Image (cartoon, rainbow, N blue to C red):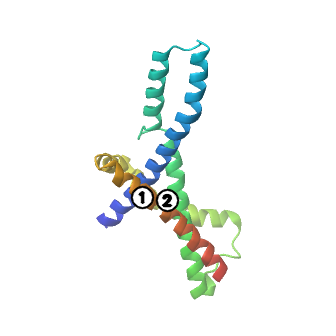
């Protein structure tokens, strides 16, 4: 079970790191261009721009409360929901009486939300357990973190492909 929890947290950190790198890249391109434009017009001083850049990048990289963490949370919930839907579709192929085709939207959302929130709560969010894993993962090399970010995104795309395939097979 510890290996599953470690893998789930590694996927979570990979998604967080991917989103963090993407947000920092977007910030560096668009916002720095805006600051440089203001600097040329002598609206903002150069040292103030450097301080603002450092503050913005540290705010984007915050592991306790940031938009990047929220995006990673939503991505993990979507990942879990896709896994659940794929398993339900595969079960309904084997046992047609399990099919959720006749279920209304609210029941379907409840059937999806309860397991995905429960899984992510107990593996990731309970007592901020993910922060312990984040500290371990941040100590590893940047090359390995980028590799795991790529693996996390590929897992997400793979689960999406399996979900689409399970719909086609039904």
> How many numbered marks appear?
2
CA separation, marks 2 and 1? 9 Å
Of marks 2 and 1, the one in the foreground: 2
Q: Nearer the viewer, residue 28 or 54?
A: 28
How far across and down, in percent of the image, does residue 110 sit? 60, 63
Q: Is residue 19 above or below residue 148?
A: above
Residue at the front extreme?
Answer: 40
Q: Nearer the viewer, residue 60 or 115?
A: 60
Question: Is disc 2 placed on a helix, strand or loop?
Answer: helix
| Mark 2 crowd level (few <14, some 14–19, many ≥20, 10 Å Cα) | some
How far across and down, in percent of the image, does residue 117 sit? 50, 58
Q: Is residue 150 left or right of residue 136?
A: right
Task: Give the label on residue 11, or none.
Answer: 1
Q: Is residue 158 left or right of residue 146?
A: right
How far across and down, in percent of the image, does residue 169 sit? 64, 83
User: In this view of the protein, can residue 163 be seen by the observer?
Assistant: yes
Question: Is disc 1 placed on a helix, strand or loop?
Answer: helix
Q: Nearer the viewer, residue 145 or 94?
A: 145
Which residue appears at 42% of the width and 58% of the height? 11
Which residue appears at 47% of the width and 50% of the height? 18
How far across and down, in percent of the image, does residue 47 sit? 45, 16
Which residue appears at 62% of the width and 72% of the height? 164
Sequence-wise first label, 2 or 1:
1
Q: Are marks 2 and 1 in contact (CB under 8 Å)?
A: no
Q: Is residue 142 left or right of residue 42?
A: left
| Mark 1 crowd level (few <14, some 14–19, many ≥20, 10 Å Cα) | many
Residue hosting label 2:
153
Quarter of the image where one finds residue 91: bottom right
Which residue appears at 60% of the width and 18% of the height? 38
């Amino acid at each position: 079970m510890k290996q599953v929890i470690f893998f789930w947290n590694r996927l979570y950190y990979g998604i967080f790191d991917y989103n963090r790198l993407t947000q920092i890249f977007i910030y560096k391109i668009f916002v720095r261009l805006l600051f440089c434009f203001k600097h040329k017009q002598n609206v903002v001083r150069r040292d103030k721009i450097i301080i603002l850049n450092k503050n913005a990048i540290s705010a984007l990289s915050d592991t306790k409360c940031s938009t990047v963490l929220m995006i990673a949370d939503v991505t993990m919930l979507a990942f879990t929901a896709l896994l659940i839907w794929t398993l339900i579709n595969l079960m309904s192929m084997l046992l047609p009486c399990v099919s959720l085709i006749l279920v209304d939207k609210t029941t379907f959302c409840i059937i999806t939300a309860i397991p995905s929130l429960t899984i992510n709560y107990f593996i990731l969010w309970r007592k901020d357990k993910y922060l312990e894993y984040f500290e371990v993962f941040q100590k590893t090399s940047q090359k390995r973190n980028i590799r795991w970010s790529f693996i996390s995104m590929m897992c997400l795309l793979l689960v999406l492909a399996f979900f689409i395939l399970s719909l086609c097979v039904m």
